[in-house]
Amino acid sequence: KQEVTQIPAALSVPEGENLVLNCSFTDSAIYNLQWFRQDPGKGLTSLLLIQSSQREQTSGRLNASLDKSSGRSTLYIAASQPGDSATYLCAAFNAGKSTFGDGTTLTVKP
Amino acid sequence: GAGVSQSPRYKVAKRGQDVALRCDPISGHVSLFWYQQALGQGPEFLTYFQNEAQLDKSGLPSDRFFAERPEGSVSTLKIQRTQQEDSAVYLCASSPGTDQGNSPLHFGNGTRLTVT
């Protein structure tokens, strides 16, 4: 059974810092790995999707990497801003089924 | 364009009542997913549809939970004889393709169910 773990559970940084969020998964047989953002009381917004054959994806200040052999993905956020404050979740997808981590709650202080 | 729409936004049910939660996916999206999210946790997979076919319902926690998507668009998640442990946010998501390797999910804002 797939298990997804995200460390740390919470992170507080001053504005402008670069930071890394970690995601680990136990079963490397995945179709893709997705990173999402969730604001309080809202649904999830897809940030980046890395297919199983890819190593990384970039969108603006975000860069996500995938290492299937070690069961790890990282989300790198450059030059963090207060508007980046949210919970970030990763999810491993295999066919239609997905397993989510419990997220990292990020607070960026002005 | 319009995103994924879920209704109602909030639902309070007395223990033992039946509830029905609705999801309107993005028009033309083939795949539809239901998730249950407890406070402070990530979403837990419930079930997956491709058009009107329910391809995976392995995440439904009991036979009190039933989902349908009869015409391949709108979906309803029904919970019979609700229990307090059913209290959670129920999220719906859709994606345009059938290939889960290429299609990011689009989520609705969820229905918060409280069973008293």
Image (cartoon, helix red, strand yellow):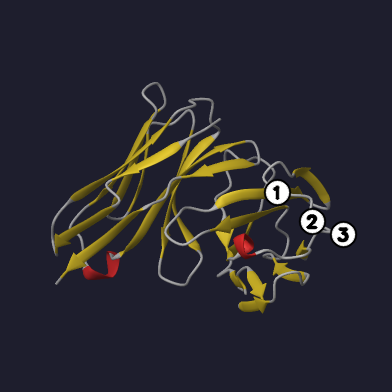
Asked if both marks, 3 and 1, belong to the same chain, the answer given is yes
Q: Tell me which amino acid carries mark 2.
A: Phe
Residue B14, picture quadrant:
bottom right
| Earlier residue among tags 2 and 1 | 1
Q: Point out residue A80 in the picture as x, y percentages from the top left corner.
A: 20, 60
Farthest right residue in view = B70
Q: Residue at x 70, y 71 (%)?
A: B15
Q: Tell me which amino acid carries mark 1.
A: Leu
Q: CA distance from mark 2 to mark 1?
A: 8 Å
Residue B77 - label: none
What residue would you read off at disc 3? B70
Q: Point out residue B60 in the picture as x, y percentages from the top left corner.
A: 70, 49
Chain for mark 3?
B
Q: Secondary structure at mark 1?
A: loop
Question: Can the viewer see residue A99?
Answer: yes
Q: Secondary structure at mark 2?
A: strand
Label 3 Cα crowd, 10 Å radius (few <14 / some 14-19 / many 20+): few
The residue nearer to you, when weighing A61 against A18, is A18
Asked if both marks, 2 and 1, belong to the same chain, the answer given is yes
Q: Residue at x 69, y 43 (%)?
A: B98
Q: Quadrant of the N terminus of chain B?
A: bottom right
What residue would you read off at disc 1? B60
What residue would you read off at disc 2? B66
Q: Secondary structure at mark 3?
A: loop
**Residue contact at pointers 2 and 3, CB within 8 angstroms:** no
Q: Tell me which amino acid carries mark 3.
A: Pro
| Earlier residue among tags 3 and 1 | 1
